[in-house]
Image (cartoon, helix red, strand yellow):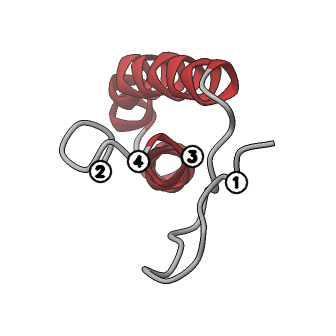
Amino acid sequence: VFFGEKRVGFGLSVIWAFYALLAASAYSFLSVSQAAGYLLMPTVVWVFIAVSLQFSIWLLNGQEPIVPVTAGAKRNPDP
């Protein structure tokens, strides 16, 4: 979504959902096996860094809509 379609806002929502599910999985794994939960922590940290970078790119590039816009609607009208 981010690279292929060049939709930074929608890519942000996708990676945020991925991060939330990953963090929930790591938390759930901790209750089953501490080793399994701790082994997911580097991935959780790395994806958090990716979410932060994606968010900063979204902020610096005009904050396009996070949800997809229909084909007939205007994305960002010029002032």
Mark 3 neighbour density, 10 Å: few (under 14) some (14–19) many (20 or more): some
Marks 1/2: CA–CA distance: 22 Å
Amino acid type, callout 2 = Val
Marks 3 and 1: in contact by CB < 8 Å? no
What residue sits 65% from the left and 52% below the top?
76
* Residue 78, horizontal then vertical, whole percent: 71, 45
Name the residue furthest right: 79
Q: Is residue 6 above or below residue 21?
A: above
Q: Which residue is disc 3 drawn over?
A: 27
Amino acid type, callout 4 = Arg
Q: Mark 1, mark 2: which one is toward the viewer? A: 1
Direction from residue 78 to residue 50 in the image, left or right: left
Q: Mark 2, mark 3: which one is toward the viewer? A: 2
* Residue 56, horizontal then vertical, whole percent: 63, 18
Marks 3/4: CA–CA distance: 30 Å
Mark 2 neighbour density, 10 Å: few (under 14) some (14–19) many (20 or more): some
